[in-house]
Amino acid sequence: MRKGTKTDAKEKKVSKPSLFLVKSNDEKPDESAVAKQISSGNSAAFSVYVREKAKFFYHVAYRVTLNREAAEDVVQNAFAKLWEKRESIQADGNMSAWLYRVVVNLAIDTKRGAKFSELHENIEGADGTQDEEKRDLTAKIEKVLAVLPPRQRAAIMMVYYDGYGQKEAAEIMGVNLKALESLLSRAKLALKEKLI
């Protein structure tokens, strides 16, 4: 059989798109290239970005709303907003930081606008189990976090759970550094009083 026949064409299947096809020298996805693809309307790149980031942003939204359905709605609305605003995405900007800010703000708005009957849901370890002492401590911390005002909870989550620096967290939340430090200070004081 000659090269270039139908059989050869079938063997050259196009692999599903991945953000990891666009890499920088450090082998991590180059977000500016992904942002450029999305801003140009590449729906395949957007779909891959959603698949790869949805779980992370769900956890961010859940930690603010403390409600699974609300967190899912927040993430869906945030990705819809990203797609709507895709043409204004700048390749040199940090698209994930922008989306993080959108998720946090939507989650805070959702929490403010809704009365949830349940303050928190059970938390499981990565393997689905936790020892009793750790589970009790985690439940106690979650209960205390649940009563914090949404902006204080978001600040605590970004800095202490998600690993953002204070400056970056302040930018994402749309506040100055002093305001973030104040949110963190009040949140830590409330946590300390409730846990001791």
Image (tube, rainbow, N blue to C red):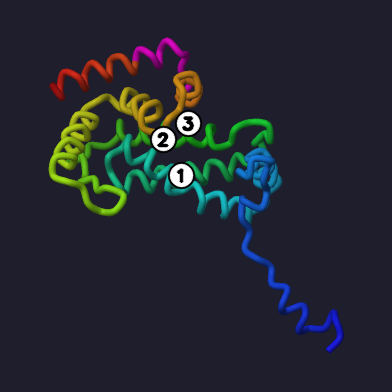
Pinpoint residue 14: horizontal percent, then vertical percent. Answer: 69, 68
Identity of the residue drawn at 13% across and 21% down:
196
Region of the chain picked out in magenta, as a range: 174-182
Pinpoint residue 48: horizontal percent, then vertical percent. Answer: 57, 54
* Residue 91 drawn above or below residue 11: above
Residue density around tag 1, few if under 14, some if 14–19, many if 20 or more, within 10 Å: some
Name which of mark 1 and mark 3 comes first in the sequence: 1
Looking at the magenta stretch, what is its main secondary structure? Answer: helix
The residue lying toward the viewer, choosing from 171 and 31, is: 31
Tell me the tag on residue 101.
3
Q: Secondary structure at mark 1?
A: helix
Pinpoint residue 49: horizontal percent, then vertical percent. Answer: 56, 49
- Mark 2 — residue? 106
- Mark 1 — residue? 77
Amino acid type at image mark 3: Arg
Tally the marks: 3
Q: Nearer the viewer, mark 1 or mark 3?
A: 3
Q: Which residue lies most toward the bottom here? A: 1
Amino acid type at image mark 2: Leu
In terms of image quadrants, where is residue 166?
top left
Distance of mark 1 from mark 3, alpha carbons?
Answer: 13 Å
Work out which quarter of the rendered image holds the N terminus and state it: bottom right
Identity of the residue drawn at 37% across and 24% down:
155
Residue density around tag 2, few if under 14, some if 14–19, many if 20 or more, within 10 Å: many
Distance of mark 1 from mark 2, alpha carbons?
Answer: 8 Å
Q: Secondary structure at mark 3?
A: helix
Amino acid type at image mark 1: Asn
Identity of the residue drawn at 71% across and 78% down:
11
